[in-house]
Image: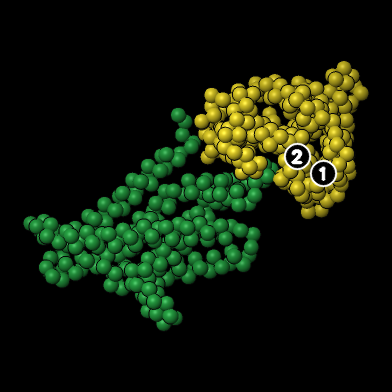
Amino acid sequence: MIIDFNLIVEYFPVLLQGLMVTLQIAAIGCFIGLVLGTILALMQTSTSKLLRTLVTSYVIIIRGTPMLIQILGAYFLLPQIGIYISALWTAIIAIGLNSAAYISQVIRSGISSIGAGQIEAAKVLGFSTRTTIRYIILPQALRTTLPALGNEFVTLIKDSALASTISVPELTKQASFIKSKTFDAITVYFAVAVLYLMLTSTVSLFIAYLEKRMNYHAQD
Amino acid sequence: MLKIDGISKSFNNKKVLNNISLTVKSGEIALFLGASGVGKSTLLRILNNLETVNSGTLSLHGKPLDLATINTTHTVGMVFQHFNLFDHLTVEENITLPLEQVLKKSAPDAKKIAHDLLTHYNLLDNKNKYASQLSGGQKQRLAIARALALQPKIICLDEPTSALDPVLTSYVANNIQQLAQEGYIVLVATHDTDLLAKLNCTIYLMSEGSIVETAQSEDLKNNPQQFPRLKKFIAGHE
């Protein structure tokens, strides 16, 4: 048997510790990505040319460089400029900022898909810009982009493995630790892959459930 | 009484409204008739601050109307051609959201007002459906109810029959006539001569941004020969 299940059981507590760290990176990273991505999308659809240019530049830089370099860059650069945070938080912030660039483009497409008629109806009813964004634009933009947002969250979970490069004890890092002790790479990476798959499937199922719940076009 | 005085509007040097002046009393319907592109919808959009105006003034009951604040003072209600309902909200929420967010009503007060309006417009059974799930006629009733919730003095309907089945025309006409009976100043933009035939209104025939002929619907019915241009327009569209 290629897979040694006894080894998985023996090291399960270590894997679980790694899983918890991965969950932490994923959850906070998604939160940063969604909140900052939404703000960036609103900036990019605003009338201010300066704001639009700022967001466009940010997106070009983040999307145009490898996330690995961004994580390593943050890890080595932050202490140089006097910011001392843990490797875990460095990874969370780097991954969150990276994800925000992608998510902003997803949400921007959702905002653009909202008909001018919706904005006009809100204006005629006397809604402030803030009320229009909160109650009319964002709920519809998030609903239409939900499947694409789900993709971004799944990508983020998998990309959190890159945090292992700056010694964050997440799932992948724990896996290499177990591998170096046991030399059973196949078993360890199999177990880790299954754990990642469980995480990403849970997110996908949850998004599918939300999609169904928020489908206001369905006839009952 | 709504007084429109010398309204003009150009888009890129093309005049779409040329010195439009008229008055509409409370309880009256002013119907702007014309082919598409004659400026009738633009006039309604100006009244709702969806377009700016190049010159001209407006007054309501003798007081000047400031177009810049017309939305926040809820003077005018608009029923759009395609209704522009908030599809992601329920029928009830389409009415309670503006009441709560704009008029700052409490949730129970907003629900009470929505309940009365939905009863009046025969939509109460559908209050928990999403707006997108309604039929065309129901959507229009909800659009009217949503506009009325903010208690405007003037209500505008842009092409009220064009998005609906022609069999509903009488029914739409009844709804519009009822608005006038309730004392609103009603402005309708349409090219639908069937709708015109079913309303008791003042007709303003528009062509290239100007009002070219005016008639009371009764007079037009009894003496069509007095209104050659209207007669021609109606004949051309039958």
Q: Give neighbour class at mark 2: few <14, some 14-19, many 20+ (Cα, 10 Å).
A: many
Q: Amino acid at mark 2?
A: Thr
Tell me: residue B56, above or below residue B143: below
Give the answer, above or below, for where B18 lies relative to A98.
Answer: above
Position of A27 compared to A128: left or right? Answer: left
Element assignment for label 1: loop
Report the residue at 61% width, 24% height from top. B119
State the hue of chain A: green
Q: What mark, if any, has residue B75 been given in the picture? A: 2
Are there few (<14), some (14-19), or many (20+) residues within 10 Å of tag 1? Answer: some
Residue under pointer 1: B65
- Is B54 placed left or right of B127 in the picture? right
Please determine whether, in this image, residue B220 is positioned above or below residue A62: above
Seen from this angle, which residue lies furthest left?
A: A1
Seen at 48% across and 70% down, the residue is A61
Amino acid residing under circle 1:
Leu
Callout 2: SS: loop
Picture quarter with the N terminus of chain B? top right
Circles 2, 1 touching at the beta carbon (< 8 Å): yes
Q: Residue at x 53, y 49 (%)?
A: A138
Q: Residue furthest bottom?
A: A80
Q: On screen, A134 above or below B98? A: below
Residue B48 picture quarter: top right
Q: What percent of the width, then of the height, locates residue B109?
A: 60, 34
Residue B24 placement, left or right of A116: right
Query: Which shade of the palette goes to chain B?
Result: yellow
Q: CA distance from mark 2 to mark 1?
A: 9 Å
